[in-house]
Amino acid sequence: MTMLLYLIPVALALGGLGLAAFIWSLKSGQYDDLDGAAERILHEDDDL
Amino acid sequence: MDCCPTGAALDVAARDGAGAAVRAAAFEHAARDLRPGERLVQFVAPAMHCGGCVSTLERGLRRAPGVLSARANLTAKRLALTYDPARASAADLAAVVEGLGYAVHPADDAEAAEAAEAAETRDLLTRLAVAGFAAMNVMLLSVSVWSGAEAATRDLMHWISAAIVLPVVVYAGRPFFVSALAGLRAGRLNMDAPISLAVLLAAGLSLSETMRGGAEAFFDACAMLLFLLLVGRYLDRLMRARARSAAAGLMRLQPKGAMVIGEDGPAWAPLEDIAPGARVLVAAGERLAVDGVVERGASDLDVSHLTGESAPQAAGPGAAVHAGALNLSGPLTLRATAVGQASSLGEIAALMAEAESAKSRVARLADQAAAIYAPVVHLAALLTFLGWLWLGADAREAGFIAIAVLIITCPCALGLAAPMAQATAAGSLFRLGIMLKDGAALERLARVRHVVFDKTGTLTAGRPRLRAPQAAPQALEAAAALAGASRHPLSQALAAWARAAGVRAAAARDLAEHPGFGVEGVIGGRRARLGAAAWVGAADAGAAGDASAVWLRLGDDPPVAFLFDDAPRPGAAEAVAALQAAGLSVEALSGDRPGPVAALAARLGIDRWRAQASPQDKIARVSLLSAQGGALMVGDGVNDAPALAAATVSMAPASAADIGRAAADMVFMGDDLRAVAQAQALAVRTRAVIVQNFAIAAGYNCIAVPLAVTGHASPLVAAIAMSSSSIVVVANALRLRAAATTGGPARDGRPMTEAVA
């Protein structure tokens, strides 16, 4: 059972990483224009 | 309608002189300084539809001089631009956007409120994410407990779970606690009360069990409850925010000010600074901002939004004119008689506020369910506690079982039942081009028994169309030539007909438009006039009957009349038929004259109609029908706005006046009136799904509660029951996604979105 001592922290850290990434993407406005984001990938824009 | 404007510049003919100055001032008003040498302005470009539009706009703007950054938001149909004020002005940038073929308006003051709204949504999403994180990780730990972890290992799992869940309960549960407290303070027991109680008790009980090394802790149930309920709450919020931002994107430039002629020439002044008696200049193409009397100039006014009358009215010196009318053909100088609250627009707004407050708010289905559910659940828990005490259990054991009852009956599925169905339905409506402002509107729409349509601009397209003319080819060619030189809507309709029918315009010279009268020119050496009956010298104006008419006189020939009618919107007859087939009574209420209303009603199969209805008449009728089983009001005009506010539920086309769109619960984007019938059909289905969902949630409780009351609700049973009932409810709601594409009255097989785009 000693492996729990490092596996649990690893699992929590990975979950926490995901949460942090989500909160970062939210704060940086990546969910503000979902329709636009879906359309933008269809256009080649060198200057974007 | 094309999807994207093709880069052809907009017709900005009406934007010359004073009009341009007003617009420039309004755009400048919307801009603000970010830092020295950098200004930010937000525009609304309603025609932005797709990625092509986004890249056209962004590229075009980035190439424009002075632009520092350009970012288009397709969801909100907005453009955020930063620019160097030394090198460009907000109006220049607006001109660039128009040059790319997109109509543009400055973003209005509602922007600040909207930003706060967005921040709140973001906050809710963060709480949702945190709850989700906790639910997943605690579930991971709980699985090991369920699969047989014992003694120290189990205690370790419980302690880690507690360390994760307790802070999360405080953070993610806050919206529920706040709402439950607010409800209790107002003396109501809302759905958030049992939720809050269950979450807090579950956390407290689990903590105490953990401290004494007990086998059963409900930490996972706590986190999952919060997660699922926050999903419901977020969906509810997302739907409203989306609809609202889209509706705000439609808001057209309402006159917030006007050109006032002061001592040093005309200057733009905001509405609140204009006093009665001021002289106001109104360019052709502009809306009147104040009530007044015409001092100088002659023009035609489009008052269809104000009164419902389809024919433009001539206005000359001495004529009393009203705020909100659209000036069509020539510049006018007015002396303001009433401004703001006192103007006719202000009166309508006051009437609307009154209607709004008088309207009895129908309780939402979820609240009705909560009103029954919460006391029953709490009573059941209390009885369980007393029952186990009576049977000889000790207080701790009895308390544990009673709390398990509360946890297992926590209205998780109930919390998802309505928002999930409404969010799915709103998504389907959105794809059909219908914006829903509030989920509750959908519930109200499902129960209406009457539908009341306005005529001008709602049942009809609000654009005149030429009836097949009976005139010599020579007269037609002359009329086409003269009509092409005018901005009057009847002339433009005539010119459009001529283009479509392949009539070549005759060669004309010395064309001159006389605002309020018509167009004059010389064709084939003869003087030709196209315009009002009296002006061309047509004695028998009665020949036109109820239809709008322009008259042509070529030299000394007898005058020829061109008659127009207001064509019904596409799908109007089908919509009326579909609504009638659904068992609703349909009627038309119009401010227009009886002739056109009767003709249209007969054509569309509406047997009950009323003409020359004032806004008060409309309110009275709609309120009466609202009391008799509920009424859906569909209207577009300023004169409809109070009735829209008074109706059980209301819809307006996107072409409606701002005030009409603001008053309506739903706004449909396309020309096609079938949207009304589709929305109604979908609302009925949504209601059915919500009721089914409530039944599913109740059925699940019928199974789970006896288990809990008899003391068999282990944390594992709670977790399985909770997630499975939520999944069933969500899956049931998702059936509404398919409803929009297969159901509804669009019978020609053509998806509605095409007509909308």
Image (cartoon, coloured by chain):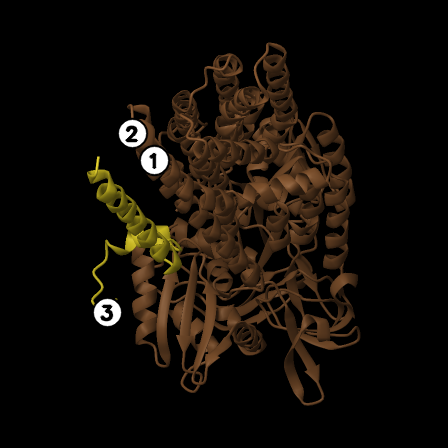
Chain colours: A yellow, B brown
Q: How many residues crowd mark 3 within 10 Å: few (<14), some (14–19), many (20+)?
A: few
At label 1, which amino acid type do we have? Met
Counting from the top left corner in percent of width and height, residue B242 is at 47, 48
Instruction: Report the Cα–Cα distance between label 3 and label 2.
Output: 52 Å
- Asked whether the beta carbons under mark 2 and mark 1 sit within 8 Å of each other, the answer is yes
Q: Classify B212 as above or below B696.
A: below
Residue at left offset 24%, top offset 54%: A41
Counting from the top left corner in percent of width and height, residue B170 is at 51, 45
Q: Classify B311 as above or below B528.
A: above
Marks 1 and 3: which is nearer the front? 1
Counting from the top left corner in percent of width and height, residue B603 is at 58, 31
Quarter location, residue B218? top left
Quarter location, residue B321? bottom right
Q: Nearer the viewer, residue B353 or B585?
A: B353
Q: At numbered mark 3, what does the secondary structure look like: helix, strand or loop?
A: loop
Give the residue number, with chain letter if any, for mark 3. A47
Give the residue number, with chain letter if any, for mark 1. B157
At label 2, which amino acid type do we have? Ser
Q: Classify B262 as above or below B232.
A: below
